[in-house]
Amino acid sequence: MKPTEERKKILTGVGIKYSKQRDLILELLNHSEMPLTAETLYIQIQAAEISMNLSTVYRVLDLFTMKGLVTKNYIGDMNKALYERNRMEHKHYLICLKCKRNIPIYECPLEKFGRYLEEKMNIDIVSHKVELYGYCSDCKQKQMEA
Amino acid sequence: MKPTEERKKILTGVGIKYSKQRDLILELLNHSEMPLTAETLYIQIQAAEISMNLSTVYRVLDLFTMKGLVTKNYIGDMNKALYERNRMEHKHYLICLKCKRNIPIYECPLEKFGRYLEEKMNIDIVSHKVELYGYCSDCKQKQMEA
DNA sequence: GTTCCTGCAAAGAGTTTGCACGAAA
DNA sequence: TTTCGTGCAAACTCTTTGCAGGAAC
């Protein structure tokens, strides 16, 4: 099955039509390790052969978010949304204060803690978000060399 | 010492001038248990006797943030900033999906986890942010009664 | 042929900024 | 008296929306 065919199946699978714009955005998100802003995506799109309006980017991202293909988030004190392919895996990020990269972290201490809190406070926890701020190993190294 | 005097001392303590606008904003933030948007603050201000422009609210909040009196954050997929008095205590919030309240939680499982990650991944963690999403005990109760 | 996606342009929300006046030290 | 904080209006950034034409099925 060709890559495009695979993505077509993903789109129809969640009950939405195929279009080359949606296909491209899905492909870009599939290949990105880290969350992207609408603008970053838009710039990547301009480098590709398919052109597209910014409002289309937003509409497609909104649609993908509603269909669960993508997650939308605001991080720290930045007032731009970050969009990321929802791979149904539980992960968080270390946001490097120097190079601004988002380094994924797959372990999580909150499962257990959540269940403990639910009992103690009589609440229901549905999901959670964790952001770690600090320095990635590359930047830590450079800092020590300097 | 009168409350206003106390706040005056806080302002001059971080090296900024006193003004009745800054005093009022500081007072409102001091008395709020949860993070507030600039607009919410602005509405609360209009209810008080002192009037103030929205841009002043933003300028004062920015200044307070730079001086460390206040923390600024974006939560979930909401594109409005939340400002909160920085009380130098470590806490997180349960954000209720029903009533949208922020319920503070003072325990945190990330201290230990952070140290573990630092060693394992050779990184430096400076700070972190945790958001829990779910239902507060009030809304949980109501849901069960319905 | 019908449905609904997209481009374009305009509007909307949240936030920031330049400038002149006014208040704090 | 000098410094700097504030009001006002305008600008700016990110995002959303209405409408008409065009693509997907």
Image: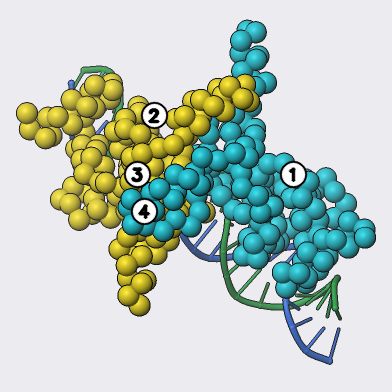
Chain colours: A cyan, B yellow, C blue, D green
CB under 8 Å between discs 3 and 2: no
Up/down of A71 relative to C8, above or below: above
* Rendered image quadrant of residue C1: bottom right
- Which marked residue is nearer to the observer: mark 4 or mark 1? 4
Circle number at residue B105: 3
Q: Which chain carries label 4?
A: A
Say whether residue B131 is left or right of residue A2: left
Residue pointed to by mark 4: A119
- Which marked residue is nearer to the observer: mark 3 or mark 4? 4
Label 1: how many Cα within 10 Å (few below 14, some 14–19, many 20+): few
Quick one: SS at disc 4? helix
Residue pointed to by mark 1: A32
- Which marked residue is nearer to the observer: mark 1 or mark 3? 3
- Which marked residue is nearer to the observer: mark 2 or mark 1? 1
Q: Mark 2 lies on which chain?
A: B
Q: In percent of the image, x 31 and y 32: which residue is there?
A: B89
Amino acid on which the number 1 mark rests in the picture: Ser
Marks 3, 2 in one chain = yes
> Distance from label 3 to label 2 (Cα)?
25 Å
- Image quadrant occupied by the C terminus of chain A: top right
Residue pointed to by mark 2: B66
> Distance from label 2 to label 1 (Cα)?
33 Å
